[in-house]
Amino acid sequence: MKGTLFVVALPIGNLKDITLRALEVLREVDIILAEDTRSFKKLLRVFQLPPKRVLSFYREVEKKREDNIIELLKEGKKIALCSEAGTPLISDPGSKLIQRVHREKIKVVPIPGVSALTCALSVAGIDLSPGFIFLGFIPEKEKELRQRFSSLPEDLPIVLFIPPHDFPTVIRLLLKILGNREAFLARELTKFHEELVFSTLEELSKREDLKGEITLVIGPAIKSPSAKNTQSPPIPLEELKSRFLELKSKGFKKREISKLLAKDLGLTTKEVYQILKEL
């Protein structure tokens, strides 16, 4: 009789978020595949689970271990697949293995739980009824980012995972490419230093030295109002001048600044450029 592959969600920070069902499965399985064996063994100790055979299963060894895991499942072994934190396969290794398990007609059982993706969306305050786009971890180079966003619809929210050391660079590129959109920063979710901030890409571009895991939800592009409502900017000219000088100090060119401010004001880039020229 063939075994079973359990796909087990783990806490993303607060260990109390683990489910009773997850603990039950981790007690019963024969083998555990863990993206990070050291952090997983800490979890075993905290919950006083019986000793298990724990195999490392990160992206670089995924293909190498695949045949052996399939053989173990065919022998009738019960195996749990766990990412380092959260729900497996959400920007984590394991998709190729699970595809192979399905093709081999071996049973796969999801053990649901917390995910930084759904956790952040639940408190973002952004309408998700039309749907949303999840990009996971994105490239840090401007050319690759532009290619990634060029084919995306502008009327849907976008969710990203950003490593803290990449945040300043990535957030400024996002502002440059997408314009100043509403954005929700979820940092260190469920942990002691949890931070939830509803802001804009422009405001977040001022943040430096962020630590911990970051999930960013970017709101859809704001539709420009009709022409009759766009004869004058909705903000004072002095504020417009101040924002121009601020963006200029960050290295943005005049054309880029005009494009960013145009989205905020509901004007064309040419109209904003002309206002800035007069200022």
Image (cartoon, rainbow, N blue to C red):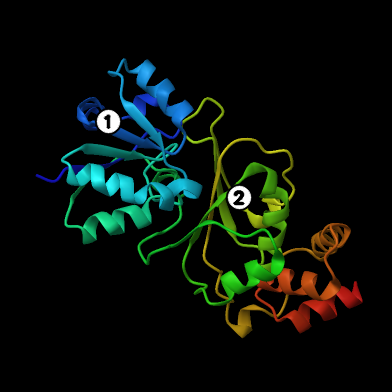
Identify the residue shown where x is 28% and y is 58%.
100
Picture coordinates of residue 220, whole percent (x, y): 52, 66
Sooner in the amino-acid sequence: mark 2 or mark 1: 1
Q: Is residue 99 left or right of residue 145?
A: left
Q: Is residue 88 left or right of residue 109?
A: right
Identify the residue shown where x is 64% and y is 71%.
146
Element type at mark 1: loop
Work out which quarter of the rendered image holds the C terminus and state it: bottom right
Identify which residue, 158 or 69, lies in the foreground.
Answer: 69
Crowdedness of circle 2 by 10 Å Cα count: few (<14), some, many (20+)? Answer: some
Work out which quarter of the rendered image holds the N terminus and state it: top left
Picture coordinates of residue 218, whole percent (x, y): 54, 58
Residue at numbered disc 1: 19
Identify which residue, 198 or 51, lies in the foreground.
Answer: 51
Q: Is residue 75 left or right of residue 217?
A: left
Type of amino acid under label 2: Ser
**C-alpha span from label 2 to label 1:** 32 Å
Residue at numbered disc 2: 199
Q: Please, is residue 34 above or below residue 246 in the view? A: above
Picture coordinates of residue 194, whole percent (x, y): 53, 32
